[in-house]
Amino acid sequence: MRYIQTVLGTIKPEELGVTDYHDHLITIGGGEEKADRDLRLDRVDYAIEAMRSFKQHKGDALVDMNPIDCGRQIEMLKEIAQASGVHIIACTGFQRSIYYDPEHWVNKYPVEEVARLIAEEVEVGVEINNYNGPIVTRSTAKAGVIKCATHYNMIKPMERKTIEAACMASIRTGAPISTHTERGTMGLETIELVKKFGVDPCRVTLGHVDRNPDLEYHKKMAAQGVTLGYDGPSRAKYWPDSVIIELIKGMCDAGYADHIMLGGDNGRASMWKEYYGAYGHNYILDVFVPRMRESGISEENIEKILVKNPARQFSIEK
């Protein structure tokens, strides 16, 4: 059986629709916000407004990639989904090690216990207080994807541990894995680790890899079965959109249109129109996808990237 787990319940994969594979709606507390105040997203009304607009622009689904103890607010995600009509998928798992204090429980518990806690967020419900207890209080919403992360040009010990835990939980639950790579590095190394830990790379999405837009590198990763997450559109500080368009064209020409998804990654208030910033969650559908068409990327491949690939990648397989 294959299904998509949203914060309001399960849907069929074919019901997911046009999907933003990696984004952010609410961030309150956690290591990232402490590091940079611009990463605080604390307005449910703004998120509802943004998602209603996203829906009007023919967006159907969004994956909120805030994992355990990175400002995740599961009850607010339910409220946003209910009010907007957008399918929202919540995640479990962990960000990079720099966002967790050395005394955080993830650094103390054995990997088997970390895996169990991740799996229970998929099977039973997301823990409202990020397991910072001592009482465990679960939401009715379940996680639909497991996150893990790697550092720039290295995988730190805590990150290797949480990759292993993510793999153990994925095998137990059937949930997919989606990663954070820093500047698109350590993709091939992550693939080797998930294979070592028993997960088919086809169940893994490598996030932010377009920040390292080396076509040959991307083809090597896709050839092993992973899906590549491109969430750099509108971020000229990394690369102009033209570079990402050429990367997508190169991947499509090489036969890898089945291995690409697009996301907005609007994790900063300064990126939201609702917080009086720029662009917002409609940029991909309003600006970037039309440019893909103008560049000659086929409707068939755009459909794969926006609809078919997310429906496959975010399916839970039981």
Image (tube, rainbow, N blue to C red):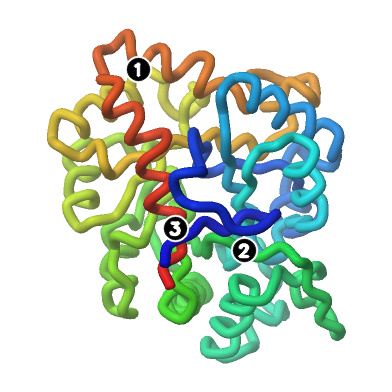
Work out whether mark 2 precedes mark 1 in sequence or the reverse, and give the earlier one.
Answer: 2
Regarding residue 274, the answer to whether it shows in the image is yes
Q: Mark 2 belongs to which amino acid?
A: Ala
Image mark for residue 143: 2
Image mark for residue 262: none
The kind of secondary structure element at disc 2 is loop
In this rendering, the label closer to the viewer, 1 or 3: 3
Work out whether mark 3 precedes mark 2 in sequence or the reverse, and give the earlier one.
Answer: 2
Q: Mark 3 belongs to which amino acid?
A: Ser
Answer whether labels 2 and 1 touch (C-beta < 8 Å): no
Tell me the residue that label 3 is attached to.
315
Q: Of all residues shown, which one is farthest toward the top?
A: 294
Task: Name the residue at 55% across, 33% down.
Answer: 264
Q: Of all residues shown, which one is farthest toward the left?
A: 254
Q: Estimate the x, y position of residue 196 in percent, counting from the top left.
A: 28, 78
Answer whether labels 3 and 2 touch (C-beta < 8 Å): no
* Picture quadrant where residue 258 is located: top left
Q: Quadrant of the C terminus?
A: bottom left
* Disc 1: CA contacts within 10 A as few (<14), some (14-19) or many (>=20): many
Distance between mark 2 and mark 1 Cα atoms: 32 Å
The kind of secondary structure element at disc 1 is helix
Task: Name the residue at 59% across, 71% down.
Answer: 122
Tell me the residue that label 1 is attached to.
292
Relative to 227, residue 247 above or below: above
Q: Estimate the x, y position of residue 15 in percent, counting from the top left.
A: 50, 43
